[in-house]
Image (cartoon, rainbow, N blue to C red):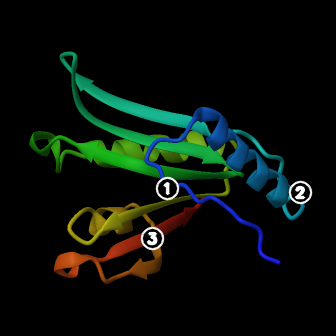
Amino acid sequence: MLLKMELSIINEWEHEDITYVRENLRSFNSQFLSGIPFRKPEPVNLILREAGDIIGGLIGNIYWQCCHVDYLWVDEAYREKKYGTMLMQKIEETAREKGCLFIHLDTLSFQALGFYKKCGYSVFGELDGYPDGIVRYYLKKAL
């Protein structure tokens, strides 16, 4: 006998709904990840300023002994001046201090694949099929 269910597709969740889903998934995952203590993701946000103006930044998170770079941006006027490299070196240093084993990130084919490769990252996955032939690359670097 099938139970009658209601499925709601909504763009905004109540905070309690989000918490409920996350906590139940964490509970399930903990059965398989007993050797890795769960920690709430720890934000790592690096901001570059010149004369008070933001000229670049890196937004990431540390969790499960790894670090994920969500966003890296340097103002076009400051590119090719090693600021991106400086941000990546700082996140790697911070990740090592926090006991991370690796860093991972993704980039699109029109963004910074060559830059990340120069920083020592290697591609471990590709996702094609985006409009205009764009490819998403997944990269990592062991610490």
Q: Earlier in the sequence, mark 1 or mark 3?
A: 1
Horizontal and vertical percent for residue 26? Answer: 77, 51
- SS assignment at label 1: loop
Disc 1: CA contacts within 10 A as few (<14), some (14-19) or many (>=20): few
Residue 68 horizontal/vertical position (percent): 53, 52
Q: Residue at x 52, y 36 (%)?
A: 44
Measured in 3D between alpha carbons, the distance from the residue under mark 1 to the one under mark 3, in whole angstroms, is 29 Å
Q: Nearer the viewer, residue 100 or 136?
A: 136
Residue kind at label 3, given as amino acid type: Tyr
Mark sitting on residue 9 = 1
Type of amino acid at the residue the image marks with label 1: Ile
Residue 138: image tag: 3
* Amino acid on which the number 2 mark rests in the picture: Gly
First in residue order: circle 3 vs circle 2: 2
Whichever of callouts 2 and 1 sits on the residue coming sooner in the sequence is 1
Instruction: Residue 46: give x, y in percent of width and height.
Output: 41, 33
